Amino acid sequence: MAWKTPKLRSFARAILSFNKEEELLDFLRDVHTLEELEEVSNRWQIVQLLNNGMSYRAVAKEAGVSTTTVTRIAHWMKHGKGGYTKALKQADTKE
């Protein structure tokens, strides 16, 4: 299944069009439900905690998720497309 669809590319371009955090946050709120925003924020928190060397069990407790969820995200960190690694590096340079 091709996942880099024209719709997804268009969405990515929309995200890239924002220069200000507040404007992007407004866009994300319009596009997502509060539950979806919470879910994606939780995933990012898990990535950050794993990147800081926390154990899967400690990450699961901190993030309020199962160790299965942590394991799934850790798998994508190691065997995915490298997006998490790139985002972590870019976030470090902006903070």
Image: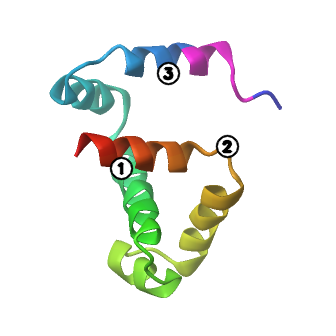
Question: Taking 86 as reference, is 66 above or below it?
Answer: below
Spatial CA distance of label 2 from label 3 is 16 Å
Magenta-highlighted residues: 3-9
Which residue type carries mark 3?
A: Ala
Q: Which residue is mark 1?
A: 35
Query: Label 3: how many residues lie within 10 Å, few (<14), some (14-19) or many (20+)?
Result: few
Location of the N terminus (image quadrant): top right
Q: Residue at x 26, y 26 (%)?
A: 24
Tag nearer the camera, 1 or 2? 2
Inter-mark Cα distance, 3 to 1: 21 Å
Q: Which residue is mark 2?
A: 81
Neighbourhood count class around disc 2 (C-alpha, 10 Å): few under 14, some 14–19, many 20 upward: few
Where does label 3 land, which residue?
12
CB atoms at circles 3 and 1 under 8 Å apart? Answer: no
Label count reads 3
Q: Residue furthest front?
A: 93
Relative to 62, say whether 19 is above or below. Answer: above
Q: Residue at x 72, y 56 (%)?
A: 79
**On the rendered structure, is 57 left or right of 16?**
right
